[in-house]
């Protein structure tokens, strides 16, 4: 499938994205956190220094000894897909990939120094070629984004929390870190789904793969539109109690719910951002060093504000209404203060007039808008 003298060439005609930065497909919530982390001097070095404490070497030996390494000689079709994915996303070094015996369909990208990709036999047997191509692209997207480092830490801390659970309060701090990492990782899964679509370039295959992960190998019994309708029903169904239950249900998970992933990916596939990438207009890795942390957080805040504005979830709508009400109240208060102090402009008290005017301006221009904006971002 990749018989070309120049190396890794896609098995069918697909667009390639030379030098593409992971910022092109990263979910805003995922991207702002990663940009901030990457800007910290020595951050990656400090994390890699933990490699002596983390079981990465043990994991590599385990997969090498008790799994099947994908190559030209073993699972050659998967090997072709892996090389295709790396070629399309311009990942120079092809990660090692293993197939491990597990009936549960799953895949992961782990590793501190070098990422390795692991897929289960359950996943290989469940998906067809195009669906599997999207999954492998998903994992290569994790590798390109550097997610494997944080995923390895999450696995290590999860196991550590279980081992020290008997120590009084010993697991509290670890649980807090694991919860935060899981929240970030759920967002990173949305990013990797987008990478999978860029590699497979077949949105229907991506949808089918997610449906099969949710409902098994009964594609003739399932329908993409009905599956996406479930996501809409899930978002807007119930009252505030259901909203709280949704939060409690998702907290222990490392992945978002499958219907939510499908709906998010479908929406992104129809967006201008996706079309621009397909047209060849996307950020390059060579520009990553010039990335602004402020811009990344601003985009993330804008995304959350838009989420609050358009969400059908009862709790998020309530938060949005409260935030909007607070902004209106602050704006109204600012206007009253401006009118109150501005009314003395003709009294000849120059110093008071000077003091009063900036106060009114700040209340109207910054405090009111700032509170409203903060409220939406927090939602």
Image (cartoon, rainbow, N blue to C red):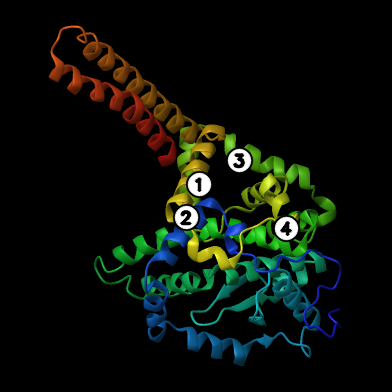
Q: Which residue is the site of mark 2?
A: 32
Asked if the residue at tag 1 contacts the one at tag 4, i.e. Cβ–Cβ closer than 8 Å, the answer is no
* Residue 74 in the image: above or below residue 332: below
Query: Which numbered disc flags the more N-terminal residue, 4 or 3?
Result: 3
Q: Of the residues tagged 1 and 3, which is closer to the observer? A: 1
Give the residue at mark 3. Answer: 234
Residue 342 position within the rendered picture, expressed as x and y whole percent measured from the top left: 25, 13
- Nearest to viewer (mark 4 / mark 3): 4
Foreground disc of the pair 4, 1: 4
Residue 99 horizontal/vertical position (percent): 68, 81
| Quarter of the figure with the C terminus | top left
Query: 101 or 150: nearer the eye?
Result: 150
Task: Kindly state the secondary structure of the residue where label 4 is placed.
Answer: loop
Q: Which mark is residue 280?
A: 4
Q: Residues within 10 Å of mark 2 (few under 14, many from 20)?
A: many
Which picture quadrant has residue 312? top right
């Amino acid at each position: 499938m990749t018989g070309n003298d120049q190396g890794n060439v896609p098995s069918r005609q697909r667009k390639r994205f030379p030098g593409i930065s992971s910022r092109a497909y990263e979910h805003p919530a995922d991207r702002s956190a990663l940009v901030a982390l990457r800007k910290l001097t020595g951050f990656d070095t400090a994390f890699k220094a933990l490699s002596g404490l983390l079981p990465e070497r043990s994991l590599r030996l385990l997969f090498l000894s008790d799994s099947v390494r994908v190559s030209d000689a073993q699972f050659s079709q998967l090997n072709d897909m892996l090389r295709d994915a790396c070629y399309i996303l311009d990942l120079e070094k092809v990660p090692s990939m293993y197939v491990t015996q597990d009936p549960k369909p799953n895949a992961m990208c782990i590793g501190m120094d070098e990422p390795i990709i692991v897929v289960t036999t359950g996943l290989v047997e469940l998906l067809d070629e195009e669906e599997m191509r999207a999954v492998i692209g998903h994992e290569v997207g994790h590798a390109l984004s550097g997610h494997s480092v944080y995923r390895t830490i999450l696995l290590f801390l999860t196991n550590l929390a279980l081992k020290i659970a008997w120590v009084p309060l010993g697991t509290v701090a670890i649980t807090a870190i694991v919860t935060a990492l899981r929240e970030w990782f759920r967002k990173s899964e949305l990013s990797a789904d987008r990478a999978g679509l860029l590699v497979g370039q077949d949105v229907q295959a991506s949808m089918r793969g997610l449906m099969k992960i949710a409902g098994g190998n009964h594609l003739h019994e399932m329908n993409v539109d009905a599956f996406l309708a479930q996501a809409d029903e899930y978002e807007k169904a119930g009252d505030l109690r259901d909203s709280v239950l949704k939060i409690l249900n998702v907290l222990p998970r490392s992945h978002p719910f499958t219907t939510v992933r499908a709906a998010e990916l479908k929406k992104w596939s129809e967006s201008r951002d996706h079309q621009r990438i397909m047209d060849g207009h996307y950020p390059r890795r060579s520009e990553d060093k010039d990335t602004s942390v402020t811009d990344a957080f601003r985009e993330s805040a804008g995304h959350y504000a838009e989420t609050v504005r358009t969400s059908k979830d009862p709790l998020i709508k309530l938060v949005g209404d409260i935030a909007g009400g607070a902004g209106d109240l602050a704006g109204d208060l600012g206007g009253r203060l401006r009118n109150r102090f501005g009314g003395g402009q003709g009294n000849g008290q120059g110093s008071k007039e000077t003091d009063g005017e900036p106060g009114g301006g700040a209340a109207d221009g910054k405090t009111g808008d700032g509170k409203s904006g903060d409220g939406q971002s927090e939602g």
